[in-house]
Image: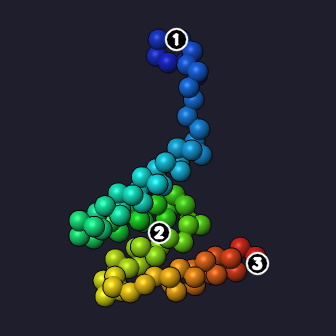
Amino acid sequence: MQDTHGSTSSFAVNTGESKKVKTLFSFVVGNQLMKSEKYQEAIQCYTKAMELDSANAVFPCNRFGLKNPFLLFFDFSVFLIVQLSLAHFEGNQ
């Protein structure tokens, strides 16, 4: 890879790793926004994480809880199990 000065760089960005970093960043920021009670901004972050990694069932769980605030007080383990089961079922068709 060459920089603007024509020298060769030994560092190249792996696009797969970059996508993982962006996904994790969106998720972590979403969690911080949720803790700060900035729910609409958190929903946007979780949505971005879902766009980057649609196979991760945690992102829609967090977003679902924020879109349905009365559920914030309940345990999401059942919802997560259902989501994982659906993802497994859809992957085996």
Cα distance, mark 2 to mark 1?
42 Å
The one of 93 and 75 positioned closer to us in this rendering: 75
Give the class, few, some or many, for how many residues have Cα within 10 Å of label 2's Cα (few <14, many ≥20).
Answer: many
Q: Residue furthest top?
A: 6
Check contact, mark 2 vs mark 1: CB within 8 A: no
Bin the neighbour count of mark 1 within 10 Å (Cα to Cα): few under 14, some 14-19, many 20 and up. Answer: few
Reading the image, the residue beneath label 1 is: 6
Q: Which mark is residue 28?
A: none
Q: Position of residue 3 (x, y in %)?
A: 50, 18
Residue 85 spot, x, y in % from top left = 64, 81
Q: Are marks 1 and 3 in contact (CB under 8 Å)?
A: no
How far is disc 1 from disc 3 in space, using C-alphas? Answer: 50 Å
Query: Which corner quadrant holds the C terminus?
Result: bottom right
Q: What's the residue at 35%, 62% (across, down)?
A: 30
In the image, taking residue 52 as reference, residue 44 lies left or right, namely: left
Q: Looking at the image, tell me whether mark 2 or mark 3 is earlier in sequence order.
A: 2
In this view, 1 is above or below 69? above
The amino acid on which the numbered mark 2 sits, given as a three-letter code, is Phe
Kind of residue sitting beneath label 1: Gly
61 vs 2, left or right, is: left
Real-space Cα distance between discs 2 and 3?
A: 23 Å
Residue identified by numbered label 2: 59
Disc sitting over residue 93 in the figure: 3
Q: State which tag comes first along the sequence, 2 or 1.
A: 1
Q: Residue at x 60, y 46 (%)?
A: 16
Q: Amino acid at mark 3?
A: Gln
From the viewer's perspective, is the residue at label 2 or at label 1 nearer? 2
